[in-house]
Image (tube, grey):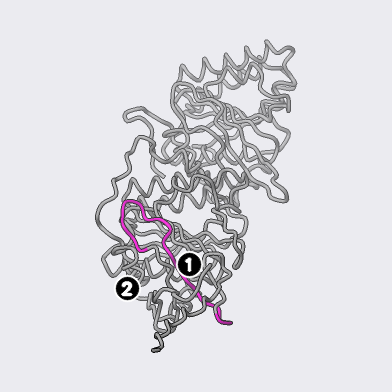
Amino acid sequence: MTDSSPRGEERLQTGIPGLDTVLRGGFRPGRTYMVMGLPGAGKTILANQVCFHHAADGGRVLYVTLLAESHTELVANLRSLSFFDSSRLPESVTYLSAFTVLEQGGLEALAELIRKEIRAQKATLIVLDGLVAAEEAAPSPQALKKFIHGLQVVTNLVGCTTLVLTTGGGRGLRAEHTMVDGLLILKQRMFGARSIRELVVRKFRGSAHLLGKHSFEITNDGIVLYPRLETLVDEGATPLPLSNARSAFGIKGLDKMLSGGLPAGSATLLLGPPGSGKTLLGLNFLAEGVRKGERGHYFSFYDSPERMLLQTAGVGMKLAPFLARGDLEVSFRAPMENILDKLGMQLLEAIRERGVKRLFLDGYDALQKAAVRPSRSARFLTALVNECRVRGVTLVYTVETTTAFGPQVEFPMRGISMVAENLLFLRLAELRSELRRFICALKVRGSGFDPALRELLISAKGMEVGATFEDAQQLMTGLARVTAPAPRPRGRRGK
């Protein structure tokens, strides 16, 4: 993920993967930001991750706690995280408990202590952890606002960036939340039995930022944030026009149907039931690209690299040398509780940073399961398709139909033309007590193609696209019917 902040503007980088992207480079030095979230949302980890990154960059940190938790417990909980560096204590990162000062002297005593320690430590970053304790000690809402304003004045004068952590007291946004320069809200939501962590930047004064909800997870390395794919795509970029160049599958009959292959830089949907040959078609497409000098990427939810190699070896495809050279990459993500934008980040990395020219995404239904909000999967795919068009990447992705046989087939979303210039339909049909596969092109934008239904053959020698079914009808319904041969004309009898 690249930093898209305006050039020349100084920023205090957070060091949190994804957060600097959302903030367009990081926090603005000398400003005050509030991080709000219920207990367990990740506020303390976020703040400490920023602190140790800032210390590693040569900054000095003052971490003031207003909580009853001892610093021994706090540090013990941080030791398991990779960003924690005990050598930074206490010279670069100083922990200070102000719980007793607040309890005995109130907000004025707390403000005086903070002013004194900022100067003594020459702090360039201060964290005030536990604002809820200050709220409870404040004699009035006006007194709390005065305390926050005074803190802002002091830290701004000395150029010290401030993070204030609070639970929000469960009473929603209040006046003191609007006083700060930025408000970051951490939430943990339940979707059925699944728990998702999200970050929202409610405001970020004086700078653009990425809007909306961004998923994150807490790992052994701390917080990792995944900006929404829709916000990362450059809306101002113009997709490359479809060229006359073709991206072939390497299957003679199919490439002939498609007048040489798919238009380069286009998006293609392979629609069909399980067992119809979608995955093998996509892998043929990648293999042919490698032979043509185009790096390919297989983004799989069902086949690990080992299973993929066994599967393709059984049909005569030898992909191991391509993998060994790095011309073909495989990303395997088991279809468990994936985070949609984590998948998006990995896809963008392949497209933007590794020079992939052919991308095979197998399959769209796994993206739908990763999207906790069902309406997002279509928008996510639209953004991905647009990115591929801008970068000149030819995308092929699979969609599994819910029925193998029957007259009804539904597209996975409305507005299919937005996410697929080309539609290839695969189907199974019973014909003369035998299961047969066939393929047809429903649409190839800006190009002529053969619309006939042709048999798709899979054997140990590979894949072939054969002849049409001249003696069958209603193949598209999956309920094929063999037509009787036309009667031969009888000769005229002589008188």
332 left or right, relative to 263: right
Q: Which mark is residue 346?
A: none
Amino acid under disc 1: Lys
Element at label 1: helix
Mark 1 surroundings: few (<14), some (14-19) or many (≥20) residues within 10 A: many
Marks 1,2: beta carbons within 8 A: no
In this view of the protein, can residue 476 be seen by the observer? yes
Q: Residue at x 41, y 34 (%)?
A: 25
Q: Residue at x 37, y 50 (%)?
A: 388
Looking at this view, is 172 or 315 the one in front?
Answer: 315
View extreme (left): residue: 244
Q: Position of residue 115 (x, y in %)?
A: 56, 19
Looking at this view, is 445 or 474 the one in front?
Answer: 474
Q: Is residue 366 above or below residue 327?
A: above
Q: Which residue is mark 1?
A: 278
Q: Residue at x 38, y 42 (%)?
A: 2
Q: Residue at x 39, y 78 (%)?
A: 317
The part of the chain drawn in magenta is 432-450
How many numbered dots are placed on residues in this image? 2
Q: Which residue is mark 2?
A: 252
The image quadrant that residue 36 belongs to is top right
In whole angstroms, how far apart are the C-alphas of marks 1 and 2? 17 Å
Amino acid under disc 2: Lys
Q: Position of residue 232 (x, y in %)?
A: 43, 40
